[in-house]
Image (spheres, grey):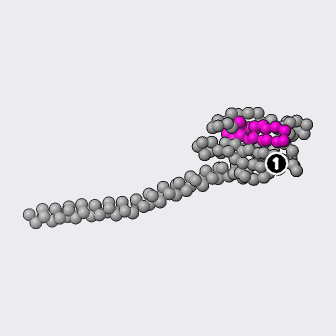
Amino acid sequence: MSETTATALKFAAGIILAIVLVGISIMVFTPAADSAKSVTNDFTNNTTELQDQKYLMYDNTVVSGSQVINAIRKFKGQEGEIGVEVTTGKSTKWYLANFTGDELTKVDTDLLNATTNTHADYINPSGMFDAEIERDSNGVIRAIKFNQQKQN
């Protein structure tokens, strides 16, 4: 009978030890999981910010007409993903895509008229433009708008 009692005590001690180990594991790994989630969220935010950085450099800045033309050329491979609206003293024209509401519609990307000084769509390289970005209702950058400043 003493063997049965000793076996029962060993079994009970093993169960108690297992419960204690599980409790310690939960206490250790739960905060680690929360930290991992926090780090993952921070990483995602940083990745999004880095992806948007190429557009954010135009947010609430003043750029020259040559920088406007360079921006259109820079984003030319992204037709349908980003629109560029240029308002000069004579006209307003969308390049790469037209952004209205939450919709992007791919448009002509030809810069010939923008570089021909007799055309209404001409972008004066030495003109100064106020730049701003536009986001859709989901917070994604969809357009950059350049508005030429009035000459004094």
Judge whether 103 appears above or below 28 on screen: above
Q: Magenta residues?
A: 79-98
Quarter that holds the N terminus: bottom left
Q: Position of residue 62 (x, y in %)?
A: 78, 52
As rendered, which of 144 and 30 lies closer to the eye?
144
Left or right for 40, reference 61: left
Judge whether 122 appears above or below 61 on screen: above
Residue 36 seen = yes
Judge whether 26 appears above or below 95 on screen: below
Q: Residue at x 72, y 48 (%)?
A: 132
- Residue 34 colored in magenta in the image: no
Q: Position of residue 81 (x, y in %)?
A: 67, 39
Corner quadrant of residue 118: top right
- Residue 88 colored in magenta in the image: yes
Q: Position of residue 85 (x, y in %)?
A: 75, 41
* SS under mark 1: loop
Q: Position of residue 122 (x, y in %)?
A: 86, 39
Q: Residue at x 27, y 64 (%)?
A: 17
Q: Residue at x 58, y 53 (%)?
A: 45
* Residue at the extreme front: 152
* Residue at the extreme right: 118
* Type of the residue with mark 1: Gln
Residue 54 seen = no
Corner quadrant of residue 76: top right
Corner quadrant of residue 34: bottom left
Q: Residue at x 88, y 50 (%)?
A: 152
Q: Which residue is mark 1?
A: 149
* Residue at the extreme left: 1
